[in-house]
Amino acid sequence: MTVYSLSLRSDDYEALKSHLIRDDGCEHAAYLLCRTASVEKDPWENQAHEKFLMTRVAPVPDDEVVDSSSTHVSWSTSSFVRALKVAAGSKQVVAIVHNHPAGQLDFSAQDDVNEPDLLQGAINRNGPGTRLISLVLTPDGQMTGRVWHSTRETGYVPLSRIRIIGSRIALSYPQRCTDLTMPAFHRQALAFGDALNRDLRKLRIGVVGCGGTGSAVAMLLARLGVGQVVLFDNDIVDETNLNRLHGARQADADAMRPKVEVVAREVTELGLGVRVVPINAWVGDSACRDALKSCDVLFGCTDDHDGRMFLNRFAYYYLTPVIDIGLAIDVSDDDIPMITALDGRVTVVEPRSACLLCREVIDPAIAADQALKRKNPEEFERRKAEAYVYGEGNPSPAVVTFTTELACMGVNELLHRLQGFRGPDGHAPNRVRLFQHNEDRRPGHSPRNECPLCASEDVWGKGDVEPFLDRID
């Protein structure tokens, strides 16, 4: 059985809510246009999953509304036909949204009667196989939804979750308000409430890179009670990792165990019920795609420029926030090195925020050389000998206290976006910690006008395309 979910950007969600929830106490309606992302098997249930990625809100104009009250709304079919025409031309799916002013988070008997007829109209216009999404919004901002695939009375599948991303991350899913008794997280609930614990249990988070920073992120997520974690890394443990990689032991270095297996072992042995899946591969490998597309949030904890280039695109195409973490330690060439810079960075990559290229975090030349080394090591070595590519220099300095503190910063950014403990303006698209000055800064960056990722909405929620991410390797 395929499960379905929907992702929206917070700015579009606010525009939708503004149109639907009004002081008149009446029902109103709007359309959403959605692209798709298909998962053959997610890494936890091994289940097919189709994600709908909202690209556009199209309110039903007030002058096309025929009748509206606190319990119903009807409108001309003109706007529906327009939405179906756009959807057919761009291979999208139409969603119909209306509000229930009384707060009923469920579909009415009248909805059950009307929606099969709307699906039949969509099939007549756009052909067999056309589907229709239906959504209900309540005054408190909660949403529920279903996907119609047949005009039969029961020809729908409920949405397993609705996810809103942006300065805040919000989840709607069945039984969200049911009790969740987890004694291990009781004191966390005393600080943030039971709702956060329930949302954390529902989340699916990927950690890309399982070194000093990524291993700390994974352990923090597990101890917070995140229900599903997937780890991506294709490196093994060696002795230089033992003082930074949380959970690593000398026996792991001796056995040259994959980092993902070591971190997964430590998470599992906590006994907190976290389902963790290790994937021993570079994040851009095709074997990682289903797992990546299954995630609600990704943590980028890799110092690989090509890996960052990949995640930078993924965040926009799949409406999946990437919390990218980096540490830079510069030292002098003196016999006794002096630290000249000690800076950590947590950057959230998502629509309405500048990408890593525009922030100059990624060097495309280095990324290209790393890609060459991975795909054609012989050619890389030949070019390195001729000084045409960057060779490997000395390893970058790293200290466990700083990598772990950055992991805390990144995970706390996620917590704020889920719970809002810093207040309405507490989110930080880019936070830089100057460790040597004991100072935090929030430098701003604007997208370059020509940037195809963050300066244009064309790829936001674009979803599945060939080649993947429009990325030619």
Image: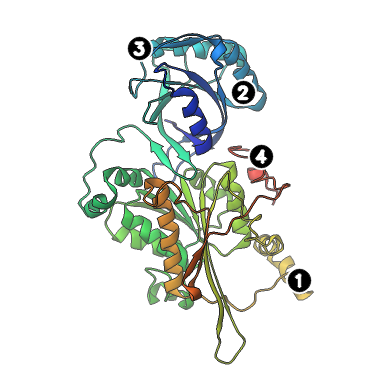
Compared with 150, 193 (above or below) is below
- Residue designated by label 2: 87
Residue sitting nearer the eye, 70 or 381: 70
Compared with 193, 178 (above or below) is above
- Residue designated by label 3: 109
Gap in angstroms between the C-alphas marked 4 and 1: 32 Å
Judged by depth in the image, the label closer to the viewer, 4 or 3, is: 3
What amino acid is found at the position of numbered circle 2 in the picture? Ala
Tell me, yes or no, whether the two marked residues, 3 and 2, touch with CB atoms within 8 Å. no
Q: Secondary structure at mark 4?
A: loop
- Residue designated by label 1: 382
- Residue designated by label 4: 466
What amino acid is found at the position of numbered circle 3 in the picture? Ala
Q: Residues within 10 Å of mark 1 (few under 14, many from 20)?
A: few
What amino acid is found at the position of numbered circle 1 in the picture? Arg
Across and down, in percent, residue 402 comes to 45, 71
Gap in angstroms between the C-alphas marked 3 and 2: 27 Å
Across and down, in percent, residue 58 comes to 57, 24
Q: Secondary structure at mark 2?
A: helix
Disc nearer the start of the sequence (2/4) = 2
Compared with 266, 470 (above or below) is above
Question: Residue at the spot x=49%, y=36% of the render?
Answer: 7
Q: Is residue 287 left or right of residue 104?
A: right
What amino acid is found at the position of numbered circle 4 in the picture? Glu
Q: Residues within 10 Å of mark 3 (few under 14, many from 20)?
A: few
Tell me, yes or no, whether the two marked residues, 1 and 2, touch with CB atoms within 8 Å. no
Disc nearer the start of the sequence (4/3) = 3
Disc nearer the start of the sequence (4/1) = 1
Q: Secondary structure at mark 3?
A: helix
